[in-house]
Image (cartoon, rainbow, N blue to C red):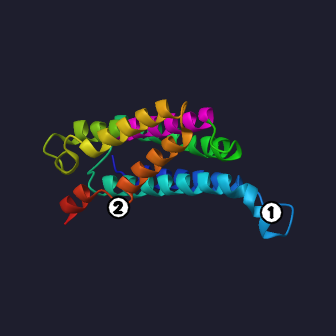
């Protein structure tokens, strides 16, 4: 089975997620710069989430570039990833509108954690389909970077009930770790 339909569908879902998210940014009713101040938490939440979606899109794109083909299991693993990513607009809005209180920040982290697990599953399903000597297997290996990220999410979820700002900092740290598309895949492509 060819992968072009999977790529097209996934790209469309990413575009819709970002569109939904930006629609949550409501313009203020006033015309003063001060009218924007209450929107700062919502904007910061949007900014972090946009960055995460860009990271997932970039890494998904790179992953599929070295994937030879897909099967039904890969399609379902991909849909699982997209499901968790479609929840990002909800937790983004909830976190921003509630000025990053504990429960919304924990929910944000839970979605990020589950999306990271879903990405890991997608990679493992691709490797199972293509074999242990495939480009994906060679590039990602044991995926230490992914496992560390999931661990940071788990820690941040727990900390969100005590210090949500530290949790947000940890979410931002993971985003910074992944801001450059996976260099392990770049090395395989060249």
* Direction bottom: furthest residue: 32
Q: Which residue is mark 2?
A: 180
Residue 8, given in percent of the width and then of the height, sits at 47, 55
Q: Main secondary structure of the magenta part?
A: helix
Residue 164, given in percent of the width and then of the height, sits at 55, 39
Q: Is residue 156 visible?
A: yes
Q: What residue do we see at 60% from left, 34% from top?
A: 102
Residue 37 in the image: above or below residue 90: below
Q: What residue do we see at 35% from left, 54% from top?
A: 177
Residue 139, given in percent of the width and then of the height, sits at 20, 51
Q: What element does badge 1 sit on?
A: helix
Task: Determine crowd level at label 2: few under 14, some 14-19, many 20+ residues with C-alpha closer than 10 A.
Answer: few
Q: What element does badge 2 sit on?
A: loop
Q: What residue do we see at 19% from left, 59% from top?
A: 188
> Quick check: 107 left or right of 61?
right
Q: Is residue 76 visible?
A: no
Which tag, 2 or 1, sits closer to the chain's start?
1
Q: Which residue is mark 1?
A: 35
> Quick check: 132 left or right of 40?
left
* Direction right: furthest residue: 30
Residue 100's disc number: none
Count of numbered tags: 2
Q: Which residues are magenta?
A: 102-119
Are circles 2 and 1 on residues that touch, CB within 8 Å?
Answer: no
Residue 108 within the magenta-colored segment of the rendering: yes
Task: Determine crowd level at label 1: few under 14, some 14-19, many 20+ residues with C-alpha closer than 10 A.
Answer: few
């Amino acid at each position: 089975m060819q992968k072009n339909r999977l790529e097209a569908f996934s790209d469309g879902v990413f575009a819709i997620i970002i569109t939904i998210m930006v629609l949550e940014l409501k313009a203020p009713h006033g015309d003063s710069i001060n009218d924007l101040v209450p929107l700062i938490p919502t904007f910061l939440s949007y900014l972090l989430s946009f960055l995460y979606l860009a990271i997932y899109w970039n890494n998904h794109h790179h992953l599929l570039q070295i994937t030879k083909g897909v099967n039904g299991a890969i399609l379902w693993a991909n849909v699982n990833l997209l499901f968790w990513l479609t929840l990002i607009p909800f937790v983004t809005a909830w976190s921003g509108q509630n000025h990053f209180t504990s429960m919304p920040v924990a929910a944000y982290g839970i979605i990020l954690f589950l999306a990271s697990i879903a990405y890991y599953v997608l990679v493992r399903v691709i490797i199972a389909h293509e074999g242990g000597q495939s480009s994906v297997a060679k590039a990602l290996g044991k995926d230490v970077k992914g496992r560390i990220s999931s661990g940071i999410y788990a820690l941040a979820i727990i900390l969100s009930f005590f210090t949500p700002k530290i949790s947000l900092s940890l979410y931002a740290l993971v985003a910074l770790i992944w801001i450059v598309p996976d260099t392990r895949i770049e090395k395989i492509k060249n």
